Amino acid sequence: MGTESRILSMIILLLLAILPPLLIAYYVYQKDKYDKEPKRLIIKSFLFGCLAILPAIFLENIYDQSLFPNLFLYVFFGIALIEEGVKYFFLKNYMYKKEEFNEPMDGIVYGVMISLGFATVENIAYVFGNEGQELRIAIMRMFTAIPLHAVCGVILGYFVGLAKFSDDKRPLLFKGLFLAVLIHALYNYFIFLGQGFIFSIIVLIVAIYYSKKAIDIHQQDSKMRH
């Protein structure tokens, strides 16, 4: 393969890695119909997600599979809790406090942007880290791992959005984090088993269904507020 062909191939792979999360991010941004968040905060939250990959890698290297007695505990605590936990950290400690976070729907918007920032960097690493399988990995993750990160961001953001405008914040924050971690863990668990991919897809489909409902609920709330 010549130099020009290699460059073109890399550009195509890079687009396949970054366009799916960006398209989902745009879709969710468009769902915020009544009081759109400032573009600077959309970009900032996305970049926080990109940054979140660093502590996630560090923690996942420490809490490897050898520390856990079985596979499910590993994917729950050693992968899903770490990845959703770092996203939650940035959502709760940075975006949650913004003056512009003024309705529950904003939790979903910022939660998804952070999740998809994380997913974009992770996707690039997976696509270019599997030599000879780049195209297959890019296409497979376009329909699986990327939507998974998005729905986890919706679920997390839905409850963080509720918590911001509730007197009883802690149970809602815990519920959002727990459900995002559980969805992520179940999805990973069946993949790691090596024979349960269909169950991972079922988990993803159910999560997408409830994510759409969550968006609709906060969208209606936003409509009533305006």
Image (tube, rainbow, N blue to C red):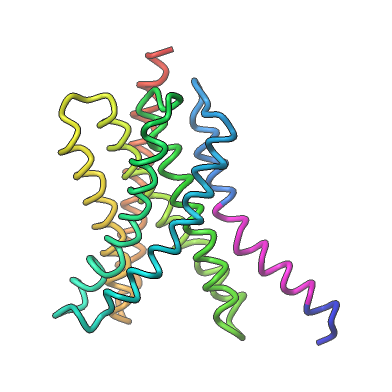
**Is 47 in front, or is 196?**
47
Q: Which residues are magenta?
A: 7-21
Query: Can residue 15 be found in the magenta stretch?
Result: yes
Q: Residue at left 23%, top 40%?
A: 173
Q: Residue at left 51%, top 56%?
A: 50
**With respect to residue 164, does 59 lie above or below?**
below
Quadrant assignment, res 124: bottom right
Quadrant assignment, res 71: bottom left
Quadrant of the drawing holding the C terminus: top left
Residue 102: percent from the left, percent from the top? 40, 23
Quadrant assignment, res 105: top left
**Is 174 in front, or is 47?**
47
Residue 143: percent from the left, percent from the top? 49, 61
Query: In the drawing, does residue 168 fall left or right of residue 65?
Result: left
Chief SS of the magenta region: helix
Query: In the drawing, does residue 226 fall left or right of residue 194?
Result: right
Residue 81: percent from the left, percent from the top? 27, 60
Query: In the drawing, does residue 112 fall left or right of residue 93?
Result: right
Q: Residue at left 35%, top 45%?
A: 209
Q: Residue at left 27%, top 24%?
A: 165
**Is 95 in front, or is 110?**
95
Query: Can residue 34 be found in the magenta stretch?
Result: no
